[in-house]
Amino acid sequence: MTEDARDGDAQSPPGGNTERLWGGRFSGGFADIMERINASIDFDKRLYVQDLAGSRAHCNMLVAQGIIEAADGHEILKGLDRIEAEIEAGAFEFTPAREDIHMHVEARLAELIGPAAGRLHTARSRNDQVATDFRLWVRAALDELDGDLADLLAALVERAEAEADTLMPGFTHLQSAQPVTLGHHLLAYVEMFARDRNRARDCRARLNESPLGAAALAGTSFPIDRRATAAALGFARPAANSLDAVSARDFALEYLAVASILSVHLSRLAEELVIWSSAPFSFVAMSDAFSTGSSIMPQKRNPDAAELVRGKTGRVIGDLNALLVMMKGLPLTYSKDMQEDKEPVFEARDTLALTVPAMRGMVGDMTVNRAAMAALAGAGHATATDLADWMVRTLGLPFREAHHVTGRIVALADQRGVELAALPLAALREIEPRLNEAVLGVLRVADSVASRTSEGGTAPDNVRAEVARWRSRLAGEGEAG
Ligand code: ARG
């Protein structure tokens, strides 16, 4: 490491310590509190797989380009393998004095192989190193999420098929609006989660550029081959601008935005499960596997998993917010503030690794109470629109007038305390004499639902067709990513 005063920047602390890898120009000691505020090893040790992969790729490239000797490269690779084994065996010593994962690996490498270790950092900086590691880590998180979302989507599609004919109230303002099928309702979430999955794939495609070789910020005078390291790490190409490569964190922001939107969708479904599983609704019963009891009320059965999916959404949104605010005032290029980028991303990933599979489990396990749903499907005169539509279609009334007549019929039903379908034809005729027997058909919930065959509508036949479309789409998407 001749040409670089470690990382080539002014981020290093005042004071100093010649035992530190960057300590050449420092003579004073490091304040205790400085060590603690500076160290990131407690959390960034999670990047070790990516850090080792980046170092291997860099080492191989340095040898191939004749920048370091093959024999040194060989020793370095052997040392990196040993370090990997030590970390995996729990035998690797982590200490705040070595700051971060990058310094830990390099310092340990020096202990294992001696001076050759110092050649690994040629034409590299921690700035391009950490950007590379972090991109690789987020990419792996996105791939894992893709699989979890595929499982959730499959569980929802399966349920939707089983409940294609299940009548339930559809709501606006959480007031009974028009009857729908549960299958249709579940497929609405399939649409949302499929968009989330596409957003995650878009994010992955955009982040898949290699910062490695940008060095501290300006590139390097060594004859490196950035295409080779990019290819070795599965990146589509090297990032084009060295300043952008070390300072961009929009890939992490985008990941957190994907995670936040997905979490909002999970939270809305969780909220519905909480409402539906309450005794007054009793639309669904969560399985024992996803419920808890109360320590005082023996009858209680609480939908804790759904509540936690809803509750944890706040964290993920907070993670996005934290990173946005941290980044907003930073000049190019790297600033140490950016060390704060990892914990929000780790937390969001850890949250999604719980919430997505938990939701999948709840969807697969819950029991649907079809009778309870059907009993309320027509409540609140939910077929009133069907009645108005019938008058438009059959009697040729303008919709506004049909709406008005229907309103009077609804008022009569309310006055008698019955649902629309329970009013005798004679009573309907007193309000609109042209009504006949045929109108009674459209007042029934099942007929109402079956009639909504417009594209994207709730009719059971539509639901079955959509289930088939989703099945083949999901099968086709399996290999992508
Ligand atoms: N631990 C640092 C981080 O996560 C690594 C990069 C340090 N670069 C520097 N110039 N001090 O951001």
Image: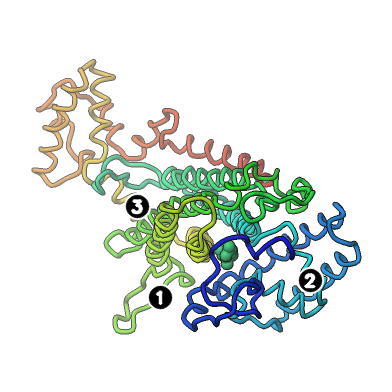
Mark yes or no: residue 409 visible. Answer: yes
Front residue of 155/120: it is 120
Residue 66 lies in quadrant: bottom right
Q: Residue at x 25, y 27 (%)?
A: 437
Q: Amino acid at mark 2?
A: Ala
Find out whether the residues at labels 2 and 1 contact each other: C-beta distance under 8 Å.
Answer: no
Q: Residue at x 86, y 57 (%)?
A: 63
Q: Is residue 22 above or below residue 454?
A: below
Q: Which residue, given by chain and number where applicable, does mark 1 sit on?
A: 292
Badge 1 marks a residue whose secondary structure is loop
Q: Which residue, given by chain and number where applicable, does mark 2 sit on?
A: 117
Q: Amino acid at mark 3?
A: Met
Badge 2 marks a residue whose secondary structure is helix
Q: Quadrant of the N terminus?
A: bottom right
Please give the label number shown on residue 373. 3
Quarter, ligand 1: bottom right
**Number of marks present in the image shown:** 3
